[in-house]
Amino acid sequence: MDAIIEVSELHKRFGPAVALDGMTFTAGPGQVTGFVGPNGAGKSTTMRVILGLDRPDSGTALVGGSRYQDLRKPLTRLGALIDPGALQPGRSGRNHLLWLAHSQGLPPKRVDEVLEMTGMRPVARRRAGGYSLGMRQRLGIAAAMLGDPPVLMLDEPFNGLDPEGIVWMRGLLRSLAAEGRAVLVSSHLMSELQDVAGHVVFAGAGKVVEAASTVAMTERYGSLESAYLTLTRGTGVLR
Amino acid sequence: MRAALRAEWTKLRTVPDAAVALPLIALLTVAVSVAASTASSADVVRSSLMGVELGQAAVAVWGVQILAGEYGSGLITATFTALPRRLGVLAAKAVCLLAGILAVGVPSIVISVLAGHRLASAYPALSSGAVLRAGFGAVAYLCLIGLVGLGIGALVRSAVAGAGVVLGLQLAPTVMMPLLDPHWARWVYRLSPSTAGQAIQSTVDLKGLPIGPWPGLGVAAAWAFVLLTLGAFTLRTRDV
């Protein structure tokens, strides 16, 4: 029951601009759910609403059946990577993870585990301000995995990774899903999602235009990329 | 709340900010105080605490920065994702801020008073009511100014803008008063947090002051309370 994100009828405006216009979908356990759509489709806003950072005008977003804001020790329920730049440049990567661990009552030992897991151990004591985007992404994954959560939500996790990093990320996403977790991944890289996502949600203009299994989409359109181009045509106007 | 406090404390001790701000507050306070004590003055106790005039600026800017600085770096997203109860975060930051101000304010004020006692002629006994009130009052005033900074930081969500606002709030009365009609100057003195708040450090001719020591400290406390309340409301209702 815990490994699920349920987004229902989210509406949100920023002044005159409609960001979310009835966004509704579910990301279930044991698979990677791809979350795709043009810039401005509302993917990032949806993720911020799920995390309680932005408040929707109406609608609900639930993590394992609860609102994120109501979760105790939320990082043990959902791990998120939405802004790899959300760091204080003067603090080391290890100390960034350390305060996060303290905020959830987790032991420092867990910090070393996730550093090892993401390959960040050799640079963990350096200032985060000096990290490349790829290192920040890995540190962000380490932060997301800190609480060993049943649900993960990653915004553009492939950004800035080198080819080795991309292979690593692909393997990580697969294994997280294989462990029974719900993994929601937004990306513009259809070829990456083609291989790892079991289910894909296509967003356009603040709502879902299609949601189906990757297999079904590939059968109908030939590939995720052509499915994307067909389904989101005309919704990508920058507003 | 305990987890929030622990997290904020870890944040504080793992960046150089506090390591720079705190010694700076001490240095400014003590240096100016000692210098002032060598000059002749009608109120030697107040003169021996002259450093508070400068130390308060560093305290206020640190108060702004401890929260508003996170908006600049983007760290605030991580903070409120880990600790979605935003008022708990504000409270934890206030506790860390006060702990830091006390850790540095108490020794600075003690040194300033001791130096004044040694250097100035006719300094009252250290155990006299006036000296104790002025000394403890100066520490309390620094704490309140730190909270004023924190409240402004929560309202404007930018370290640079917040520092500008809080320094303006502190300096404007001192700049304005000589230019104003004496009647209005007294009102500015009574209502602004820095002039009214520092009345607690006066020990001579209290009847002649525009506001008494304790009511004056009360004005500074009111500023801190109102700004923190508005800041808390902003934090709770606005999107991050």
Image: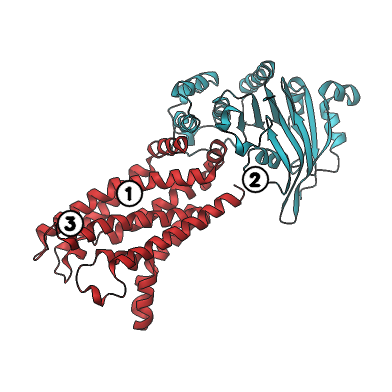
Query: Local crowd at mark 1 within 10 Å, few (<14), some, or many (≥20)?
Result: many
Q: Which colour scheme is used?
A: by chain
- Up/down of A72 relative to B87, above or below: above
Q: What residue type is disc 2 on? A: Asp
Q: Position of residue B19 (x, y in %)?
A: 33, 42
Location of residue A236 (image quadrant): top right
Q: Among the chains, which one is cyan? A: A
Query: Local crowd at mark 3 within 10 Å, few (<14), some, or many (≥20)?
Result: many
| B174 left or right of B80 in image | left
Name chain B's colour.
Answer: red
Q: What residue type is disc 3 on? A: Val
| B117 left or right of A78 in image | left
Residue pointed to by mark 3:
B113
- Up/down of A105 relative to B138, above or below: above
Cα–Cα span, label 3 and label 1 = 17 Å
Residue in view at x 34 percent, y 45 percent = B99
| A78 left or right of A25 in image | left
Check the residue under mark 2 and report the chain it is in. Answer: A
Q: Where is residue A184 in the image (x, y as percent from the top left)?
A: 70, 29
Residue pointed to by mark 2:
A54
Check the residue under mark 1 and report the chain it is in. Answer: B
Q: What residue type is disc 1 on? A: Ile
Q: Upstream in the sequence, badge 3 or badge 1? A: 1
Q: Do the residues labelled 3 and 1 touch (CB within 8 Å)?
A: no
Cα–Cα span, label 2 and label 3 = 50 Å
